[in-house]
Image: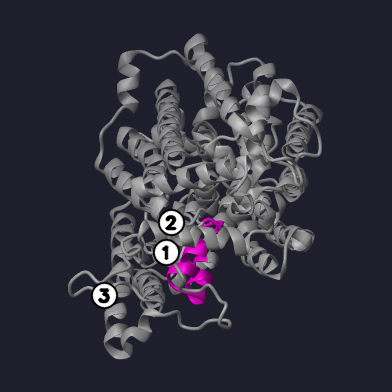
Amino acid sequence: MSSDDAFNVPVGTAYAMLYTVLVSFTILAVIAAGFLPVPSFLQCCVASAVPTFAAGGAIPTGASATGKMARRVTLHTGGGADFFLAARNSSNSRAIALSFFASGMGAWVVYGATEMGANPELSWLGVLGYSGASAFPAIVVCIIGPRIRKMTGEKAFCTTDYGLARYGRVMQLAVAVMSVFYMFIYIVSELTSISNIYALMVDKSTWDGANMAYTTGIAVSLAVFTWFYTSLAGLPASITTDKFQGVLMFLLVFIVLIAACAKPENRITKEEFAVASNWTTDGLTAAVTLFIAILSAEMFNQGTWQRVWAAESVPAMRKGFLWGSFLVFLLMMFFGIMGMISYANDPLAFDTFQKFYYLAFFELLRPLANFWHVVVLIVVTALAASSVDSLQTAIAAIFSSDFVRLSGQKGGSGQDWKIRLITRILLVLINIPAVIMSSKRYDVISLFLVADLVCATAVLPVYLGLMTKDWGFIAAPTELGALLGMIGGIATVLVIGALYNFNEAVNPITGETIATGPFSYFWLTNSYQCALCGIETMITFIVTPLMGGFFCLFFSKLDVMIRGERARQPIFKFGENDVAGQYILDAEDTSESSSDSIKHEVNEDSAVPDVSVENVSDTAEGAAVSAGKDDFEDEEAAY
């Protein structure tokens, strides 16, 4: 590549754009937290991300107190730590759609789908697989989300609470470990991606040690700012920034359309596109791998699951996730096709490694004026920031949910400041190693693949817990059975690695040794083409979750046969008041008992008992609250 072809955004300009976006998001967070009034031009974007009523504020009466508003009064009047971590029942379907779309589409999207499209050995099936796989988890959440929300009740924050309610403390810890591991890798990938993009745009090599201070500085800036405003405003800030990120993503699409269609340098003929447009076996294996890998991992992405409880109703949640899934699919398809166009424009350069598949998106940007390169920096910074803040709030919810429950039992919101302080400290402890790892410049897709395989070992043992009754000879999973199922999934990966005589993970491009020993197979360096390619990788992702599920059911059956009904209880509890193993049964509950369960949570666990159903039932406000509770029960009954 000649110097004339290089990007040349001035370093000072790049820093200015970085801090402009991060400061803007911080201001949005301050507004979302209620520290500043919402400007009129931001009402449509911020209003649904803040508590409907302030602490001590008047409860609306008459026609203004709708069912949805009444439900919000009951569940999170006054905000506090609960709303900080859950934004409970505050978001409509549009907010959920944009939030899922934006939080999942971070800076990595400019690498992932375009790499699939630019690789002629993967091409269409690789692109379709990546697009469908990225959209599919939202559809699964639409199906099982309402049941998980029902089982855990309206005081849950994420699926670690499902692990606690369905199984017990051991599985709560196991789900938390899996979730934090996956989201930590996600954060590392985002910090790596944004650092690489900034280095590319200012013409600095990411492999030159002399530039490490610059790229690490970018990662530190992003981590510090997102930590600051998520510590300040929690999940409401994340949902607010997600809306802006969604809009900015469409701006990025518009930029690429200009580059691909308006510039003569990027125009290709039908015959040239045919060279990049292929249907291959390698593409099929990559597609199968992607569907299983991404679904397994996203089931532990608590940033997604938080939106289940943030939705104002079950229909809003389903509608939001379906629309978000559709937007994700379209966007990934777009980037994949852009990668194909980039390859078709100069196949020889890609085949001889003068250009790289993962940078195919940026090859389309080269003909654009420098102004557009600056705009791209703004957009990808917004993408990375909004994804990282979603992950940070999700990690905070995992660590803080038990603190919130304990605070409620001890009498209210006076403990909220302690919970937020603990949350902030924990996020610092997560961000520091994430920044350090991002400086190692691991391949982004390879990082995701490691996390995906780890999650694949546990996905069925965890979510088979949705089966709460024996099904003929098959026993409903027990906590011990689920735990042994996860261990069995890990053992399956090690056995597969041993069968392939695999004891060293080596980067197929650089020749660098990544890891050694039996656990090195988790890096899945089975193919020189890409991290996702190879029949061995596909087989691993098919067999691993199936064996994890098999071991879960097998050991659960043995557990019940040996220990009897005691096997269906948590392995241990912390005292009589521990909520471990206490979930709500859909099939066995009558509508009356379900109502009592919800009423118990609102009255005894809420930090604001003065607005509970009983306390205001004889007033006009109470009628509105009761109507809101009835609306929620109707939605659950419909499910």
State the separation of the CA atoms marked 1 and 2.
7 Å
Q: Reply yes or no: does residue 557 show up in magenta.
A: no
Magenta region: which residues?
154-175
> Which mark is first along the chain, 3 or 2?
2
Where is residue 561 drawn, in percent x and y? 26, 87
Q: Is residue 66 left or right of residue 459?
A: right
Tell me the kind of residue under disc 1.
Answer: Ile
Instruction: Bin the neighbour count of mark 3 within 10 Å (Cα to Cα): few under 14, some 14-19, many 20 and up.
Output: many
Where is residue 514 drawn, in percent x and y? 53, 62
Circles 3 and 1: CB atoms closer than 8 Å: no
Instruction: Bin the neighbour count of mark 2 within 10 Å (Cα to Cα): few under 14, some 14-19, many 20 and up.
Output: many
Q: Determine whether the residue tagged by mark 2 lies in a helix, strand or loop.
A: helix
Circles 1 and 2: CB atoms closer than 8 Å: yes
Q: Determine whether the residue tagged by mark 1 lies in a helix, strand or loop.
A: loop
Instruction: Bin the neighbour count of mark 1 within 10 Å (Cα to Cα): few under 14, some 14-19, many 20 and up.
Output: many
Tell me the kind of residue under disc 3.
Answer: Ala
Who is closer to the viewer here, 7 or 570? 570
Q: Which residue is mark 2?
A: 150
> Which mark is first along the chain, 1 or 3?
3
Residue 368 falls in image quadrant: top right
Q: Is residue 517 left or right of residue 393?
A: left
Front label number (3 vs 1): 1
Who is closer to the viewer here, 498 or 418? 418
State the separation of the CA atoms marked 3 and 1.
19 Å
User: Considering the image in quadrants, where does the N terminus appear?
Assistant: top right
Q: Is residue 529 left or right of residue 447?
A: left
Task: Report if residue 115 is visible in the image.
Answer: yes
Residue drawn at 62 percent across, 67 percent down: 402
Q: Which residue is mark 1?
A: 584
Where is residue 292 drawn, in percent x and y? 34, 52
Q: Which residue is mark 3?
A: 475
From this view, report whether residue 162 is shown above or below residue 280: below
